[in-house]
Image (cartoon, rainbow, N blue to C red):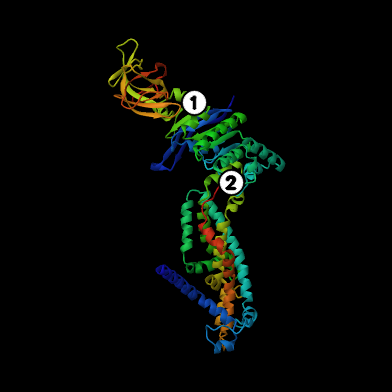
Amino acid sequence: MASALHISGIRKTFGSGDKTVEVLKRIDIDVAAGEFLILVGPSGCGKSTLLSIIAGLDDPTEGEIRIGHRNVVGVAPAQRDIAMVFQSYALYPTMSVAENIGFALEMRKVPRADREKRIAEVAAMLQITHLLDRRPAQLSGGQRQRVAMGRALARQPQLFLFDEPLSNLDAKLRVEMRAEIKRLHQASGITSVYVTHDQIEAMTLGSRIAVMKDGVLQQLGTPDDIYSRPANTYVASFIGSPTMNMIAGSTNKTLAGGLFDIKEASLPLAGPAGGEALLGVRPEHISLSGDAPWRGEVSVVEPTGADTFVVVKTAAGDITVRTSPQTQAKPGDAVGLQISAGHVNWFDAVSGVRL
Amino acid sequence: MIAKNFSRVLIYGVLLLAAVLFLAPMYVMLATSFKDAEEIRSGNLLSLPNGLNFEAWTLAWSSACTGTDCRGLQPFFWNSVLIVFPAVLISTLWGAVNGYVLSLWKFRGSDLLFGFMLFGVFMPFQVVLLPMSQVLGWLGISSSVGGLIFVHCLAGLAGTTLFFRNYYAAVPKELVNAARIDGAGFWRIFVRIIVPLSTPIVMVTLIWQFTNIWNDFLFGVAFSGADSKPITVGLNNMVNTSSSVKNYNVDMAAAVIAGLPTMLIYVLAGQYFVKGLTAGAVKG
């Protein structure tokens, strides 16, 4: 199937001469129809600028955006067949909820009867029928969020854009709305691009995730790719909480099975050829075991309910281990650490690129 | 307790004194306007009139003489009305569009342009008198009501732009972006989304402009013709018309008539003025 959204070679610079700032450095992303693409990264990584360029609110310095078969660079936002949900919701303050939802249809000269039918459908879908006559100022944060979603849904666009839509909600509501967005996406099947800085939102919502940093696409892949096979140490540390353990060391070829020498210990892992490397292991792939040869001392025990994270101080640095809440470990205990050999990641010691 | 009461009394005393000082001229004007010539000559400046005698008001309004023209203030009053309504409406609307562009549709150099416009707020208008009269001449509207409307629109534009620009600076840009994606254009966004938000600042601007233009004397005296003089100029000419006796009661009535519309506007819409100046960001 043709890609629903094709981003190729997008560059964006601000300023000129010596003060030129390059916010996006050649971004290429292909989004298949029905996909839910997440743009994730720290603030200032260019993700929101990229979304603005897709929406047509900003023009790229270079590159091409295709929605369906159409190159839309230079096309007005209204003509791109997109709908967008903003961080501040951007509801029209002087219009009722119904007028807000129907505004885009009104601008497109949809007859009143059809418009009202569509407003009623969308309101029912989002369970906001009882709010239709209210003004945005009379709504709670969660209700405004629903109206903003409704305004986007009413249009049945080719492409949905979300700009950190959940970041103004409290934690409980955020989880609810996250599930709601996922449900709506599954029901509508409309291709979506979603910007967030929250890695949990990225993992739970995305069918694919694009991790960005400093205007460069670091990795593009499924949540599982990103989590289990991060392309570099930046992605590895950005996704996952607590973050992946990084252990510096070098490959030792003296033993047939392979050894990885780290500070004051050797791990029975076949390291990459060529000496120095970084070993990346998620907390859930290390376990505490009384007799393992790699030793350390428990420094912090953090229960989170379902899991307990134990931070172990070793000669090679602090290592976080995920254990069951029943763990007996307490600060000061001497423990051994066991790595699950099937789940290790190797990174270049200098560039941080996955080996 | 006594000390507290004392300070209360002191505060009220000072406030009362200030009020009396500010209201005294107003009182003298009103009281004198209701007296006849005999009362004024024999009585005290501060004494109450013997009754509500509207003779001076009628004279001032319709038959007092300015030079040889004895039609009272009436023609000047209607000139002012003809000038003030279009000038206030046009300058307010124009300022609103300017503010909308300068805050929500910024372009390269728009902040610089706004900086230049700010000059207009602080520039003494005496500076533009000569060039302006040239321009009015070129446009063929010198010495006319139309010319005065034009001058007041231009002179007020910097101020109205400033008001609207600062008010709209608090409007989130996302609102405009959402409307652009929804399919509304520049004017549609202005009319459907921005103008409905603007009631407080529109009230402020209307009051501000009405007061400025109604009370204007400089442009009125410099750019008006024989039949386009505004009320401030009319009042001045009437009071300065030399006659054997000074009709203080008529002069006072005329001055009150000249000042009445602005007072009325403030009484009717003054609450919006304060509210509008302190109105915060848009909720939504």
Q: Are marks 2 and 1 on the same chain?
A: yes
Q: Position of residue B152 (x, y in %)?
A: 56, 65
Q: Is residue A310 left or right of residue A211?
A: left
Q: Chain of mark 1?
A: A
Residue at mark 1? A223
Q: Position of residue A238 (x, y in %)?
A: 42, 30
Which mark's residue is nearer the viewer, 2 or 1? 2
Q: Position of residue A19 (x, y in %)?
A: 39, 42
> Which quadrant of the figure has residue A312?
top left
Confirm whether residue B238 shows in the render: no
Q: At x 55% / y 38%, what residue is drawn?
A: A55
- Amino acid type of disc 2? Pro
Q: Where is B100 relative to B178, above or below?
A: below
User: Please, what secondary structure does the residue beneath circle 1 have?
Assistant: helix
Q: How many marks?
A: 2
Q: Quadrant of the N terminus of chain B?
A: bottom left
| Identity of the residue furthest to the right in this view | A113
Residue at mark 2? A136
Earlier residue among tags 2 and 1: 2
Confirm whether residue B11 shows in the render: yes
> Which quadrant of the figure has residue A145?
top right
Distance Cα–Cα, label 2 vs label 1? 35 Å
Q: Where is A82 relative to B171, above or below?
A: above
Q: Residues within 10 Å of mark 1 (few under 14, many from 20)?
A: many
- Amino acid type of disc 1? Pro
Q: Where is B220 relative to A194, above or below?
A: below
Q: Chain of mark 2?
A: A
